[in-house]
Image (cartoon, grey):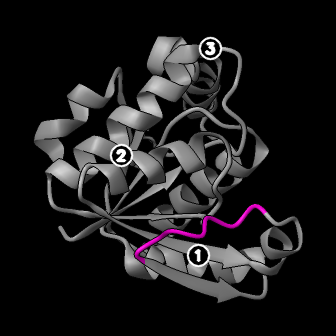
Amino acid sequence: MKAVCVFCGSRTGASSVFLETAQELGKLIAKKNLKLVYGGAQVGLMGAVADSCLEAGGQAIGVVPQVILENEVEHKHLTEIHHVGTMHERKALMVEKSDAFIAIPGGFGTLDELFEILTWGQLKIHHKPIYLINVTGFFDHLIDFVDFATKQGLIHPDHRKLLNVLGSVSDLESLL
């Protein structure tokens, strides 16, 4: 494993635990001598995970779509920055550059990225691990829904297993 992709919020959220989780994750990625691949923003949890990784001596690769450039929230101090035209191009390049995927709290963008990567795994477009860090139970309702859809026969049990739910960043340490 050489690089991990992190999906997370462009806002910090209501709980200080979200920010602490992003910072802890950035430090762990650097400690494991892995590259961080992420959406390239300097704001919110995205900026925090990148800053923590860089401050701990790690490398951070941003994949920045045009809309982020237009909103002027691109991180200016990354190891590597790739500019792409669309969000679709962003996700495709992030998949190409990553060996695993980790989601921490976030909003619609985080969920979009998480579900697309799960779908790509289901379709065998990739065979890379996908981790969901359910800090403070943030994703409890989402996990309940995924389990409900599985029980209803709409998600195959083998595909449900693609989503590896962890309680904290420390649970991830032995998996990277």
Instruction: Say which of 165 and 77 sits in front.
Output: 77
Q: Residue furthest left?
A: 174
User: 134 above or below 122?
Assistant: above
Q: Name the amino acid, label 1.
A: Val
Label disc, if present, on residue 15 of the rendered structure: 3
> In the rendered structure, which disc, 2 or 3, sits on the residue that comes first in sequence?
3
Asked if the residues shown at circle 3 and circle 1 are in contact, with their CB atoms under 8 angstroms apart, the answer is no
Query: Is residue 125 in view from this perspective?
Result: no
Label disc, if present, on residue 26 of the rendered structure: 2
In the rendered image, which quarter contains the N terminus?
bottom left
Asked if the residues shown at circle 2 and circle 3 are in contact, with their CB atoms under 8 angstroms apart, the answer is no
| Left-right relation of 7 to 100 | right
Instruction: Say which of 91 and 127 sits in front.
Output: 91
Residue at image location 63% in from the left, 26% down from the top: 142
Magenta highlight on residue 76: yes
Distance (Cα) linking label 3 and label 1: 27 Å
